[in-house]
Image (cartoon, helix red, strand yellow):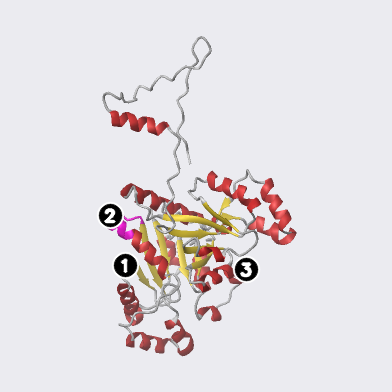
Amino acid sequence: MSKAKTPTTDPPANGQPGAPDPPAETPHHSEDPAAAKAFYDSLAPKKKPRLPKPQNAVTIAVSSRTLFNMSEDRKVYEEEGVEKYVQLQQDQEEVPLQTGPAYPFVMAVEEVNKQLRELYPDSEELFDIVLMTNNHAQVGVRLINSINHYGLNIERFCMTGGKSPIGYLKAYLTNLYLSADSEKVQEAIHEGIAAATMFMGKKNLILPDKELRVAFDGDAVLFSDESEIIVKERGLDSFFEHEKTFENKPLAQGPLKCFLVSLGKLQKKFYAKGARMTCPIRTYLVTARSAASSGARVLKTLRSWGLEIDEALFLAGAPKGPILEKIRPHLFFDDQMFHIEGAQELGTIAAHVPYGIGQKYNKSALKEEAKK
C-alpha cells in the first residue's frame, strides 16, 4: 500500500533543517479551507480502514495455503518435519510468500468494501477476512510481513499450532471457510459452515479488479443433493419426471446457500443507493441442468428464498469450463471434481464443495492430493 511522500526541504545556510516551501498548487486556507484540509490530509500516511465488528460482518476465513502459494514450504514440512519447516519460515521472514488461489478473491472483496464505505461511511456491514491456519505462531511473522507486503487489510489471525482450526470457525462467526485441506473442509461442512477446497487455475485469466464475481453450481452446492440422488439411483428420465412433479416445491438448502444470502444482503445495500447497474458484486448460477426440463424448480426455489441471481446458465450437461472462462469468476463452487478439473484447465480458480451423494461416485487424483 503506497504512502504519500513528504515534501523534501533544502537546508538553510546555518545547516539547520527548515520548513518546506508549500508547492505552488497548495490551496490557501483563507481561499478554500476544505481544499486546503484535503491537500494536507493527503500528505499524511494512509491508515488502514477500521475493521467491522464480527457480528455485523460477512466473515471469510482463509487458510495460509490458499492465500499464499506454500507448496514448496509444504514439501519441507512433509519430508523434513515441523522443526525444519518452522526454521525455514523464520529464516525467510523478510521474503514475501507468493500469492495463492484465494488472493484474487480477497483483493476483490477489499474492493467491494472500499465501494461500500464510500456509500455507507459508518456501516459495518462489510466483508472481513480472517487468516485461519494450523501453522505455529513462530511462522506468524512471515505471514504478517507477506500480508503487509501486498497491502491486505487482514488483522484477525487464528494460528493453532498443528491442531485443526475448525473448532474456532463458529467463534469467529465464519460465513465461508476456504482451505487447501479437503478433510478440514469436510469437518467445517459437517459443522454447518459453508466451506470449499480451493484449486488454482492452470493458466492465467485476467480477472476484474473493480467487481467481485462468484459462480455457483446448483445441486449439492446451493441446493441439497435431493435431485442428484434421483439421477444417480434412477437415471435422468426419473429425474426429469421428479422435477416436473415437484416444480412448485422448493429444494432444500445446500451448504453454500447461506453464503449466497450474505452476498445478496450486500448487493441490496448498493441497490438501495440506486447502484443496481454498477453493483460490484455479481453472482452466477452455472448448472448442468436443462432449462426446459428441470430449470423451473431451481428458479422458483431461489425466488422462494428471496434471492436474486444475476445470471443463470443452464448447460444441459455441456462442459462448464468454456463458460467459466468467459465469466472469469474469482471463485467457482462445484461439488463434482470433473467440473472443478475442467474449470481449472481453462484457468478458473475453482473451489470443491465435498457434499452429497456425488462424492461417492467421483474420485480424482486432484481430490486425493487435497487430502494430504
Please provide percent x and percent y for residue 313.
36, 70
- Residue 345 visible (yes or no): no
2 vs 3, front mark: 2
Q: Which residue is drawn at 43% across and 47% down?
A: 50
3D distance between C-alphas at marks 2 and 3: 43 Å
1 vs 3, front mark: 1
Residue range in magenta is: 267-280
Query: Nearer the N terminus, badge 2 or badge 1?
Result: 2
Between 307 and 285, the one lying in front of the other is: 307
Between 205 and 66, the one lying in front of the other is: 66
Are discs 1 and 3 less than 8 Å apart at CB?
no
- Residue 47 visible (yes or no): yes
Amino acid type at circle 1 is: Glu
User: What residue is pinned by disc 1?
Assistant: 308
For mark 3, give the secondary structure: helix
User: What residue is pinned by disc 2?
Assistant: 275
User: What residue is pinned by disc 3?
Assistant: 369
Magenta stretch contains residue 68 = no
Q: Is residue 15 left or right of residue 304?
A: right
In the displayed structure, would residue 232 be above or below residue 101? below
Between 242 and 64, the one lying in front of the other is: 64
3D distance between C-alphas at marks 1 and 3: 35 Å
